[in-house]
C-alpha cells in the first residue's frame, strides 16, 4: 500500500456534491490517495462519479493526463453505501453544507458520524499531535 509523506492512506469524503467531488478528485489525482465517498443520496453519488469521468476525459483530451493515468485516478475513488464504509479511512472530510433533510434525521446522521469517528479514533490519533 502506498503511504505518502502526509500519512493519509485513505481519505473519506462525506458528501458527494460539487465540493465533495472536487475534493475526492484532487485527492485521488494530485495526492494519489484512495478516496471513499459517501452520500445519503445514491443519485448524488452517481452524479459525482459522472462528473469525475467527465473531468478526467477532458484532461485526457487536452493532453494533461494519459488514459491510463485517468483510469488509475478513477480506480482510486470508491463509494461507501453507508457510513460504516468510512470506518477504516484515516481522515474524513465532511462537506454537507446545506442540510435539507428533517432536522431530527440530520441530528441522528451527525450522531452516527460522531460514532464513526470514535470507532476510528486509533486511526485519527496517528494524525493528531499529542
Image: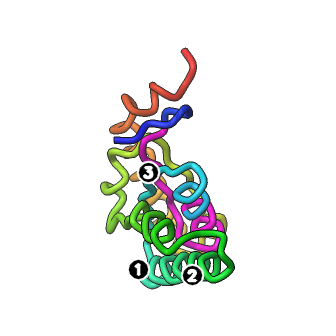
Q: Residues within 10 Å of mark 3 (few under 14, many from 20)?
A: some
Residue ID at (44%, 51%): 113
Q: Give the number of the disc on residue 72.
A: none
Name the quadrant containing residue 27: bottom right
Secondary structure of residue under mark 3: helix
Spot occupied by residue 31 in the image (x, y as percentages of width and height): 57, 49
Q: Label 2 neighbourhood size at 10 Å, few (<14), some (14-19), many (20+)? A: some
Q: Is residue 18 magenta?
A: yes
In the image, residue 14 lies at what x, y percent?
A: 50, 60
Alpha-carbon span between mark 2 and mark 1:
23 Å
Which image quadrant: the N terminus?
top left
Percent coordinates x, y for residue 40 in the rendering:
43, 72
Residue highlighted by disc 2: 57
Which residue has dot 3 on it? 113
Q: Residue at x 50, y 48 (%)?
A: 92
Any mark on residue 42, and which? 1
Q: Where in the figure is residue 76, as x and y percent of width and height?
A: 42, 60
Mark 1 burial class by Cα count in 10 Å: few <14, some 14-19, many 20+: few
Residue plotted at (46% across, 53% down): 12
How far apart in space, not on screen, are marks 1 and 3 (Cα)? Answer: 18 Å
Q: Is residue 10 magenta?
A: yes
Q: Residue furthest top?
A: 130
Quadrant position of the C terminus in the picture: top right
* Magenta part of the chain: 8-24
Pointer 2 or 1: first along the chain: 1
Q: Is residue 62 toward the left or the right of residue 52 in the image?
A: right
Seen in the image, is 9 located left or right of residue 127? Answer: left
Above or below, comparing residue 112 to residue 56 in the picture: above
Asked which colour scheme the image uses, the reply is rainbow
- 2 vs 3, front mark: 2
Nearer to us: label 2 or label 1: 2
Amino acid at each position: 500500500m502506498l503511504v505518502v509523506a502526509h500519512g493519509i492512506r485513505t481519505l473519506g469524503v462525506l458528501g458527494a456534491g460539487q465540493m465533495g467531488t472536487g475534493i475526492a478528485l484532487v485527492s485521488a489525482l494530485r495526492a494519489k490517495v484512495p478516496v471513499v465517498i459517501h452520500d445519503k443520496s445514491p443519485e448524488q453519488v452517481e452524479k459525482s462519479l459522472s462528473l469525475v469521468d467527465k473531468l478526467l476525459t477532458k484532461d485526457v483530451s487536452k493532453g494533461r493526463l494519459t488514459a491510463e493515468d485517468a483510469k488509475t485516478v478513477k480506480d482510486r475513488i470508491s463509494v461507501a453505501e453507508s457510513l460504516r464504509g468510512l470506518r477504516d479511512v484515516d481522515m474524513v472530510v465532511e462537506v454537507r453544507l446545506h442540510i435539507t433533510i428533517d432536522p431530527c434525521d440530520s441530528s441522528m446522521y451527525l450522531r452516527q458520524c460522531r460514532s464513526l469517528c470514535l470507532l476510528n479514533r486509533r486511526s485519527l490519533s496517528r494524525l493528531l499531535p499529542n
